[in-house]
Image (tube, grey):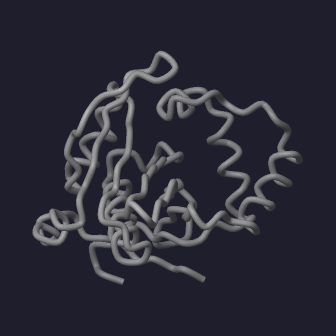
Amino acid sequence: MAKDDKAILCRKSLADAPADYTWQTDPELAHLTATIPITTSLTDYLLEYASQINHEHPSKHQFAIKTRDGRHIGNCACYGIDKAKGEAEIGIMIGDRRYWDKGYGTNAVSSLVQYTFNQVNSIRIHLKTLESNKRAQRCFFKCGFTVCGNIINNGNNFVLMELLRSQWQQNKDKYPQSCQLILR
């Protein structure tokens, strides 16, 4: 692990479910991801969560974002993987507010980009973020993403961003360092 690593990405486990449940029921976090807070019980959530992590769909790779000392602080994923087009979408959420604006998200996105280009073999990564979520946009710009459009979906204004593998390979020394990725 490099000295600058803040985060570790690892496969999600059932131990991550309580934090995820807290974040999924939080109205402010739901607003930042343009979703509605879940209202299901923790018991029902745990059953669905266990099913999802045990039967992950091949077009979606989910990771927990953890600190070096193992604290679960957020989640990220590449999904909508289209091998024929060589494309994937990514998303990230730092759910633990104590870790906002400290570089953990940037470190995690950098690793997720590296994983998506090298392991998933995508040639284009794209994402959408709320137009009002300037924190997320700063993170994505630091990692090399550029704006490629705007869209309105369910009354929400989104900025569309993309990163091409050729662009990333040319400039990866300029982007933030990626963190450790544990795939077991």
On the rendered structure, is 12 left or right of 81?
right
Give the residue at x 54% y 80%: 183
Q: Residue at image x 73%, y 52%?
A: 18
Q: Nearer the viewer, residue 140 or 152?
A: 152
Above or below — where is 27 with respect to 122?
Answer: above
Counting from the top left corner in percent of width and height, residue 108 is at: 39, 62
Quadrant where the N terminus is found in the figure: bottom left
- Name the residue at 37% across, 64% down: 86
**Furthest-right residue in this view:** 43
Residue shown at 80% from the left, 60% from the top: 51
Figure quadrant of the C terminus: bottom right
Task: Decide which of 47, 2 is in the foreground and name it.
Answer: 47
The quarter of the picture where residue 171 lies is bottom left
Residue nearest the observer in this picture, 136 or 66 = 136
Q: Is residue 174 left or right of residue 124?
A: left
Where residue 32 sits: x, y (%)?
A: 47, 31
Specify the quadrant of the image occupied by residue 11.
bottom right
Quarter-of-image position of residue 55:
bottom right
